[in-house]
Image (spheres, rainbow, N blue to C red):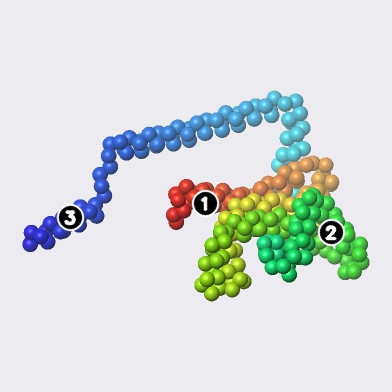
Amino acid sequence: MVDSQSTHDSAAGASSTPPVSEIELSRRDYRRKQQLKSVVTSLVSTIVLAIIVVTGLKMSPGWPRVKQTFFSPEYFVKSLPKTIDGLWLNLQVLVVAVIGVAIFATLIALVRTSKNPVMFPLRVLAALYTTVMRGIPMIVVLYLIGFGIPGLGLFGRINPAILGTIAVIMGYSAYVAEVLRAGFNDVHPSQRASARSLGLTAGQTTRMIVIPQALRKVAPALMNDFISMQKDVGLISVLGAVDAVRAAQIEVASSYNFTPYVVASLLFILMSVPFILLNDWYTARLRKRELSGGTV
């Protein structure tokens, strides 16, 4: 009876939370105070900066004219519906471009990391492609594709949105392929060797072992490329596609007021903010995981 009682007491003592020392309590209190101090300092500095900016704008001689030209409530409300309609085209182009870039860039990255001698000509072409496409400005790529392909006269009249989508895919595939290639090369060779020793084929090893690990490593860089692509889909307006930017241009041409450009900018910002926050969160998560020694 005594033995069972002592066993119960020892088990209860082992499961109970150990008492926190006075030193640890003082450390926690100090960290709370420092965190509160940082929040207050950030809030005060933000308010001071906002006051300085607002005061500087109001003191500028041309502020009333700039306010009416770029921040007119009347033209904001007037141009918002048509700009939103144009943004729908940007979203459609973005979805198709993301899928196309994911497929094309992955193929390029796999070709460039292949060690098979038979793939040598393709490796040279892939290296040449990524070098050339990363050196050409995106707007020039749009001009070359948007006006060059119709000039061949092989396909008849082509929708400018389709040509713009092809140009975006070709341009961003080079950037994303290099990011993926860096991720593939960063996977330790022992991972491949272990997979092959378990009986996986080369294709299965790449699909099940290499690609998942590489994507986890380069996810922040891929998110940055995706955010840049969101902005650059607005360049399809140079080909005549009536997207958000083109709709804003039409409104500006009819009113000589630049507020529609501000409307288009705000819509693109709203479209990008969720992915920017997701990228920041995932980057912080990866950093925390690395600092904790890789524990999940």
Q: Nearer the viewer, residue 197 or 7?
A: 197
**Residue pointed to by mark 2:** 145
Q: Is residue 147 left or right of residue 268?
A: right
Q: Secondary structure at mark 1?
A: helix
* Quadrant of the snapshot with the N terminus: bottom left
Q: Give the residue type that dot 3 points to.
A: Ser
Q: Give the percent coordinates (x, y) of residue 12.
A: 20, 55
Q: CA distance from mark 3 to mark 2?
A: 77 Å
Q: Give the residue type that dot 1 points to.
A: Leu
Which quadrant holds residue 106? bottom right
Q: Residue furthest front?
A: 117
Note whether 37 is above or below 141 in the view shown. above
Q: Give the percent coordinates (x, y) of residue 36.
A: 43, 35
* Neighbours of disc 3 within 10 Å: few (<14), some (14-19), many (20+): few
Which quadrant holds residue 25? top left
Q: Nearer the viewer, residue 135 or 22?
A: 135
Q: CA distance from mark 3 to mark 1?
A: 40 Å
* Neighbours of disc 1 within 10 Å: few (<14), some (14-19), many (20+): some
Per the rendering, the mark at residue 94 is none
Q: CA distance from mark 2 to mark 1?
A: 38 Å
Q: Secondary structure at mark 2?
A: helix
Identified at 75% across, 25% down, the residue is 61
Q: Is residue 135 left or right of residue 192?
A: right
Q: Nearer the viewer, residue 115 or 104?
A: 115
Identified at 84% across, 47% down, the residue is 254
Say if residue 290 shows up in the picture: yes
**Residue pointed to by mark 1:** 286
Q: Earlier in the sequence, mark 3 or mark 2?
A: 3
Q: Earlier in the sequence, mark 2 or mark 1?
A: 2
Q: Give the percent coordinates (x, y) of residue 269.
A: 66, 48
Identified at 70% across, 64% down, the residue is 111
Per the rendering, the mark at residue 10 is 3
